[in-house]
Image (spheres, grey):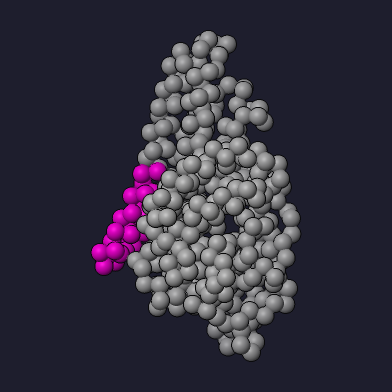
Amino acid sequence: MSDTEVLDRVRELTPLIRERAAEAERNRRLPDESVKELKESGLMRLLQPKRYGGYEADPRLFYESLFAVAAACGSTGWVTGVVGVHPWQVALFPDQVQAEVWGDDPDTWISSSYMPGGRMVPTDGGYILNGRWSFSSGCDHCQWVILGVIVDRGDGSAPAMWNVLIPHTDYRIEDVWQTMGLCGTGSNDIIVEDLFVPEHRTIDLVKMFAWESPGLALNTSPLYRLPFATMFANAITGAIIGMAEGILAENLEYTKARVSKSWGKATDDPYTVTALGRAASEVDACRSHLLHHIGSMYDTVCAGGEITTEMRSRARRDQVQGTARAIAAIDDVFDRSGAGTIMWSNPIQRLWRDAHAGRHHTVNSIDRSLHSYGMTVMGFSPTDVMI
């Protein structure tokens, strides 16, 4: 199967994912059938190195696939985006780690929790780690986890921020996920106690952001020269854009059949129909911006060029705006959809709640990001770490 065929397969399975959306919400985790189908589709290996069964695909294919899944089920789309982008980061770790993760099973999934919830101290051959991390989406279906940590190197230097990769046998999951949206993501807590972490399962974030990670010695595809901040932030916003597309698709069918007490046929209400057109334009613009920026970066590195600070700043600007604009668009449509959309049986309300829950992810901090863009275009250094 070629990487372009993956998108076709994903589109074929989305009706099944849509049918299970209520089940995912009810059980507060993805259905096992959906996980199995996502693995079989190849979607979760699009950003994975070819050396370990991946496609090293054009990242636009990954985000197109993400839109399709999120339109069918917000929770499944969210996990697809977050977990699906992790193979890209694992490719930056030492090759020994990549072999540990994918050597026996190229379909191994990895969850994450990047906010530093724990502290590591040095010991012979590695570090001792303790901590608790929240919001590890999809962790019930994952065999490894990437965690953000503070490293106290014990040599008098300032603590550093690193990521570590640890197997599921070395941590426990605590079920705390009781939420109003994205209920099916199972974004539970990860707890680690007195764990020895070998040196090779760590990665320095300063080096990672500077493209100095050890995995780049073997994973030389231009794909791995893209910025982590852009790749991960787009996985969040891409899921929300997909949810907005799902709401619009559901609402078109709902409006065609709906009878309004004020207008009779809802299609005779010019304001509702106009709102649908306006929302569709806004969501399409958000999609186009995301694909344009990641595609432009990818084309640049494929041609041997360098991704500039301005390119990263523009991508960040339009990523946070993409989340805000997509949600504003669906809010306008939702507000005009009548009381029927608030019924639990209506998929529109679930996608609407999922999108609003997703907005609360830290990568959607809009004021900080737009301030950073303004500083950058005036010739100053970025003030946002997600550049």
Q: Is 252 displayed left or right of 301 in the figure?
A: right
Which residue occupies 62% across, 72% down? 166
Residue in view at x 48 percent, y 69 percent: 52
Magenta part mainly helix, strand or loop? helix
Percent position of residue 205, x then y: 49, 72
**Which of the 4 image quarters holds residue 167?**
bottom right
Q: Is residue 340 left or right of residue 44?
A: right
- Report the residue that reaches farthest toward the front: 1
Indicate whether 142 appears above or below 341: below
Q: In the shown orientation, is residue 141 left or right of residue 48?
A: right
Find out whether residue 296 is within the magenta segment.
Answer: yes
Q: Decide: is 182 above or below 45.
A: above
Q: Which residues are magenta?
A: 287-313
Image quadrant in which the N terminus is located? bottom left
| Residue 5 appears in the rendering | yes
Q: Quadrant of the C terminus?
A: bottom left
